[in-house]
Amino acid sequence: TEAAINREQLLARRRQVIGSTCSLFFKDDPLVVQRASMQYLYDETGRKYLDCISNVQHVGHCHPDVVNAVTKQMNQSNCNLRFVNANLPDCAEALLKTLPGLDTVLFVNSGSEANDLALRLARDFTDHTDAIVIDHAYHGTVTTTMEMSPYKFRHGSSIVQPEWVHVAPCPDVYRGDHRLDDKDLENVAKLTEMGVMYADDVEAILKENAAKGRKVAAYFCEALQSCGGQVIPPPGYFKRVADYMHAAGGLFVADEVQTGFGRVGNTFWAHQIGNEGFVPDIVTMGKPMGNGFPVSAVVTRREIADRLGHNVPYFNTYGGNPVACAAVLAVLNVLQRDNLLEHSQAMGKIFHEQLMELKQRHQCIGDIRGVGLFFGLDIVKDRKTREPNTRLANDLILKLRRDEGVLLSTDGPYANVIKIKPPLCFSRENVFQTVNAIDKGLRELCN
Ligand code: PMP
């Protein structure tokens, strides 16, 4: 058909002019997106797909409120932030309302840039150099953040771990250094004990560094580890790590690039789960913030922001431009008006119940972890050894895309974790469709 011919031509043209290392979903049979609306994508033949992976298009693909706000502001003005426009303080004030204890915002354009700026803020404030990150972390694609991402530098890449970066164990109670038995994976008391053990690992690194005369500017952690396998840190872990960091004269940076803006439902930010009253020194955010319009930010305290550059003025051409801020304001407005945090929480509850039931039926599901609209299914060869089953996870996502029109992806250090993180407009019917598709897919693949 004409659509098929156009598709082949399009893929060939893309291969011709785009770097071969740029990643693609379903690389052997890439998905052409002709149109997108809310939680659905449509390919060049008009086939409809349920999108369980686009966490960036947070309130829905092409949400009309965001499209209209961006279009209107683009027609009105789009000067850089050396000129004054009300959208900038409007947007900063709205963000700060969600982060009590922090009072200052710096706008940038991507998650990577936000984390790079967070590192510089921490270094300029503490006069220390080093960073502690956790194993399998991903903090971005610019050189410094690649150097802070074991997810990238532990896989034969040209980026090697520099001496200023220290890697703490990932606080993963299923696959990490300290593990819980299957029956205890949701036991809060046992999880809390694990939190202490993992936090003490960070303290040990701080002590080791102090003995060598190295000083740590910041500890960076994804509020829920995303690319590294959808990992939820144990309750109390962050608070305890922050105490150790402060005692060593360093800062705590929460990377909320994937997990903020109500994805987890119960709270606006994921670092707030299970960490009563805990306030990071710096929070970085991006992805869902502009619903696909590039915008990100670093939120911190004034005393930290004011030390940035030690008197060299900070300027960023696109950061905080009026159109970007209009997108963010529209996202925040939709989240509130449509009660999307409550919705995400409710959908997460159903997902959890349904997925736990699936786990009983399928031995290959080793672990289900998640909250709100952020879930991971850890696919294993054997429940006892927890050996990852990368092949089955990959076969499942290909099958679901082909047979059911349900889009999922895999991630984690062994690429065996099925990720679910759809736009927050994802409905109850969508949850059941996804769970039923996984159920059917596993039944067919495992028999
Ligand atoms: N931090 C985290 C936790 C991320 O998941 C990502 C992107 N996957 C980034 C930072 C980098 O964001 P960006 O791609 O917008 O630069």
Image: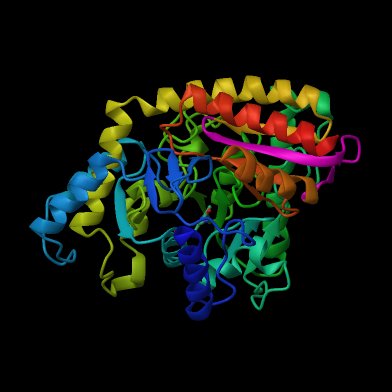
Q: Nearer the viewer, residue 369 or 90?
A: 369
The residue at the far left in this view is 76
**Region in magenta:** 372-390
Asked if residue 373 is positioned above or below residue 85 in the image, the reply reads above
Q: Residue at x 52, y 30 (%)?
A: 372
Camera sees residue 430: yes
Asked if residue 61 is positioned above or below residue 315 in the image, the reply reads above
- Residue 234 drawn in magenta: no
The residue at the far front in this view is 1
Instruction: Give percent across and percent down for residue 287.
Output: 42, 51
Q: Residue at x 38, y 49 (%)?
A: 35
Instruction: Give percent across and percent down for residue 76.
Output: 8, 56
Dividing the picture into quarters, in which one does residue 108 lie?
A: bottom left
Dividing the picture into quarters, in which one does residue 218 lie?
A: bottom right
Instruction: Give percent across and percent down for residue 303.
Output: 33, 55
Camera sees residue 176: no
- Residue 377 drawn in magenta: yes
Instruction: Give percent across and percent down for residue 123.
Output: 47, 66
Left of 317 or right of it: where is 248? right
Q: Nearer the viewer, residue 233 or 280?
A: 233
| Image quadrant in which the C terminus is located | top right
Q: Nearer the viewer, residue 74 or 42?
A: 42
Q: Residue at x 48, y 80 (%)?
A: 17
